[in-house]
Image: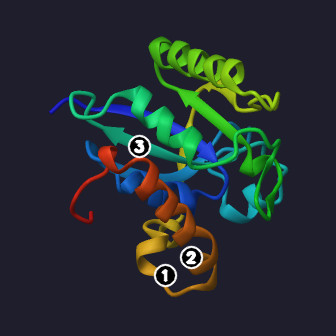
Amino acid sequence: MSKEVAVFGGGCFWCTEAVFKMMRGVSSVLPGYAGGTTKNPTYEQVCSGNTGHAEVVRIEYDPEKLAYKSLLTVFFGSHDPTTLNRQGNDIGTQYRSVVFYTTEKQKADAEEFIKEINESNSAGVSVVTTVEPLTEFFEAEEYHKDYFNRNKNAGYCQVIINPKLEKVQKQFADLLETIEK
């Protein structure tokens, strides 16, 4: 199996991780931080908004089973890419919408995808998602990993993550695994 890496920031990484863990062809999803200036930042440092990092997920996937454009489809469909530095109640640059590309092809695909969204949007609201090169990825602390599956009864999971997962399951059923990971 060949593997490629995609890195997306679309608000809280607990939500984003749970979404991409459901996808067919994804072998791992790891929450972390990217796009900032502090080496090995902690969650508390990133939450301060002073490091420049975004909460992201690093996705390893098999491109023979799942196209990068399918990942983009789910990414853009599972969060609001038109709000600057915000997803719901999560506010700050650490929650920005961002695609960190690992290849020039990913960069071109992401830019083309955003262009298509903007051209097809009749409401005139533009995508604010940035497309940036991945320079470094810092793995999040252990307690953030697989957060949703370990905390399904927590209020945040019930109120925020569950509805997002239900939406993804309805809209993108053809891209999801049929068994739980």
In the picture, measured across the screen, residue 130 lies left or right of residue 141, that is right
How much space separates mark 2 and mark 3, taking CA atoms? 21 Å
Q: CA distance from mark 3 to mark 1?
A: 21 Å
Q: Is residue 175 above or below residue 66?
A: below
Counting from the top left corner in percent of width and height, residue 17 is at 48, 56
Q: Earlier in the sequence, mark 3 or mark 1?
A: 3
Name the one closer to the observer, 78 or 27.
78
Image quarter for residue 177? bottom left
Q: For the residue carrying disc 2, how many other residues have a C-alpha within 10 Å: few (<14), some (14-19), or many (20+)?
A: some
Per the image, label 3 sits on a secondary structure element best described as strand
- Judged left or right of residue 136, residue 178 is left
Where residue 59 appears, as percent x and y from the top left, is: 41, 43
Q: Earlier in the sequence, mark 2 or mark 3?
A: 3
Sequence-wise first label, 2 or 1: 1
Residue in the picture at 58% in, 57% down = 13
The amino acid pointed to by label 2 is: Cys
The foreground one among 58 and 127 is 127
* Residue at 75%, 50% in the rendered image: 94
Tell me if I can see residue 140 in this picture: no
Q: Quadrant of residue 66?
A: top left
Task: Name the disc covering residue 59, or none.
Answer: 3
The answer to the question of whether label 3 and label 1 lie on touching residues, with beta carbons closer than 8 A, is no
When the figure is inspected, residue 149 is found, relative to residue 86, above or below; the finding is below
Whether the residues at callouts 2 and 1 have beta carbons within 8 Å, the answer is yes
